[in-house]
Image (spheres, rainbow, N blue to C red):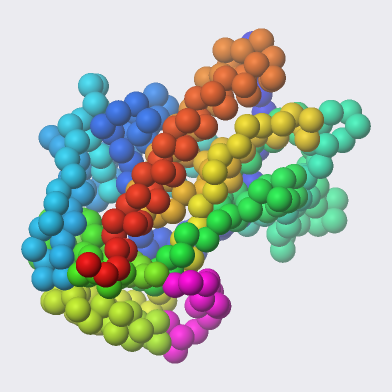
Amino acid sequence: MTPPSITVYERDANVVPAGREGYTISLAGHDETGGLYAARDLGILDDVMKHAVQSFGNKFEFTMWNSSWSELLTQKHEPAPGLPASGIRIARKKLRQVLTDVVGRERVIWNTTCVDAERLHNGRMLVKLSGSHLSENDSTAECDLLIIADGASSKLRASLRPNDTLQYTGIMQKGGLAIFPNGIPKPVDEKWGLIVSSGKGVACFLSPYDETSVSWGLSYRAPTIEEPLRISSIEEAQSVIEESKELGKEFVEPFQSILDATDPKSVSRLAARDKQPFSHDLSLGPAIFIGDSNHAITPFSGYGASLAMKDGWDLATHLCGSQSLEEAVKAYDATSIPRATKMLKESRQRIDMSHVTGL
């Protein structure tokens, strides 16, 4: 059988842009829904493990501290059979590197955004492209199957499913990457997790990024989305850091030192939003949504990357093992939707637990 011809259009540049490299993500390995399972099936598990910032070989531990850094709870999982760890933290840019290397960088068209799509009379999909390097003749592409993985704010979902939008969870988050040339302060040098305030609705996620830096995200309840979300200057970034110091004034050291050590170029502001998964309607054309483009999930789940990787593997498996696209998509939906629904529910529960107010 002749393998399909695959082209990947990637919005970002070949070199990871500033503002998107300064955080780590979780890949779970304590059951078959985790990203490490997908990495194993893809044959890239060893390469992924080489880049792990933290690897929980015997157990996966998520720590929750109070404002004085006393441990409130530790969530533990054993590694699933056949996996070397129950979970890892990995820099986003390193995971992207491993995935693009295995796909083949020659298949990736960088700095190119898919902005619109429509079904043609011949049953194929026409995709409209945007990029400063594209000529008028290169501004569209046709394909037999369009697999959409353009994130929570998917432009193609907005085109094909305009009423399927993100829902604001009532939580805002400010974050950044703190640099410590002489080493990360304790206890973040060895653990990752969440500091929570005593009933004031404020929490801070912390995780080592490498040996000398730590990513942080201070989250709090806000009735509406705070604008603007995009940080456009060093002065604005410094203002966000100062606001975070005030919001987290209850947290003792090393919290304030982490904020003081933050690189202003890494500072971000985001609104935590999510979206329920949906079943596919092929009357819109041969287009399949995977990852956050289908079921957006907040960072509080720690499971977005795992879901996306499992979606990709499961979709490929069903496409290769089915007699028709309709059969493959039906099987894919039956696998991916319950998995995403479960994690969305757990994400909302974690938000409620982390940002409790009052007694």
Quadrant of the snapshot with the C terminus: bottom left
Q: In this view, does 222 lie above or below 7?
A: below
358 lies left or right of 327: left
Q: Does the magenta stretch include residue 230?
A: yes
Quadrant of the snapshot with the N terminus: top right
Q: What stretch is highlighted in magenta?
A: 222-237
Predominant SS of the magenta segment: loop
Q: Say if residue 320 shows up in the picture.
A: yes
184 lies left or right of 166: left
Q: In which quarter of the image is residue 13?
A: bottom right
**Residue at position x 52%, y 72% in the image:** 224
**Residue at position x 43%, y 65% in the image:** 171
Estimate the x, y position of residue 206 in percent, counting from the top left.
25, 62
Q: In this view, does 148 lie above or below 203?
A: above
Estimate the x, y position of residue 217 in percent, counting from the top left.
33, 66
Front residue of 46 and 283? 283
Q: Quadrant of residue 354?
A: bottom left
